[in-house]
């Protein structure tokens, strides 16, 4: 039935059915509206050449590069970008996706660390030392 049409059973009154609306990107107040998953973000970064995995190496703010095996200070990460994610179902799921270039081999890499009160000591040390 088309909105505003009449039917014999309703006595000729217009139909109250609303027309469908596009609601992408619209969210309730206080609810994260970025519905992109961590998996989708990582796949997109891999597709743009971020092939190395960067990971915390100990609790002193060091990172390890999977491409060359070198450990380096988080502050040495070049061409840094950061993206915070918080879980729509649980805002305490605080994750930081960091991209950068290894200072040793120049590989473009991705680092995923937790931040906030539930972050590990290793993740917190890295986050505090990022440029």
Image (spheres, grey):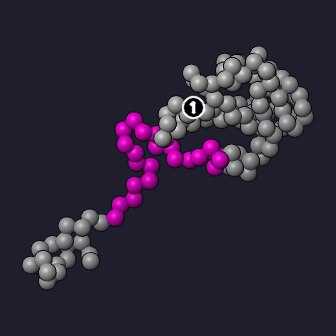
Judge by depth and name the residue closer to the eye, 129 or 59.
59
Would you say residue 89 sits in the magenta stretch?
Answer: no
Q: Is residue 66 above or below residue 72?
A: below
Residue 115 percent across, percent down from the top left: 61, 26
Could you tell whether 79 is left or right of 36 in the image?
A: right
Judge by depth and name the residue closer to the eye, 60 or 97.
60
Q: Main secondary structure of the magenta part?
A: loop
Judge by depth and name the residue closer to the eye, 107 or 31.
31
Residue 18 percent across, percent down from the top left: 26, 64
The magenta segment: 20-41
Does residue 131 appear in this view? no
Q: Secondary structure at mark 1?
A: strand
Residue visible at 72% across and 22% down in the picture:
122
Could you tell whether 108 is left or right of 69 in the image?
A: left
Q: Report which residue position mark 1 lands on.
A: 94
Does residue 40 appear in this view? yes
Q: Residues within 10 Å of mark 1 (few under 14, many from 20)?
A: some
Picture quarter containing residue 2?
bottom left
Picture quarter containing residue 5?
bottom left
Residue visible at 69% across and 19% down in the picture:
121
Residue 80 percent across, percent down from the top left: 71, 31
Residue visible at 87% across and 38% down in the picture:
67
Would you say residue 33 sits in the magenta stretch?
Answer: yes
């Amino acid at each position: 039935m088309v909105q505003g049409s009449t039917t014999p059973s309703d006595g000729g009154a217009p139909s109250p059915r609303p027309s469908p609306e596009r609601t992408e990107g619209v969210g309730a107040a206080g609810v994260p509206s970025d519905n992109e998953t961590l998996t989708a973000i990582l796949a997109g970064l891999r597709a743009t050449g971020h092939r190395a995995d960067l990971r915390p190496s100990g609790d002193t703010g060091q990172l390890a590069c999977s491409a060359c095996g070198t450990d380096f200070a988080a502050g040495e990460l070049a061409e840094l970008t950061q993206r915070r994610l918080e879980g729509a179902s649980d805002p305490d799921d605080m994750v930081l996706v960091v991209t950068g270039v290894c200072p040793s081999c120049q590989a473009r890499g991705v680092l995923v660390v937790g931040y906030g009160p539930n972050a590990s000591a290793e993740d917190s040390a890295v986050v505090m030392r990022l440029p």
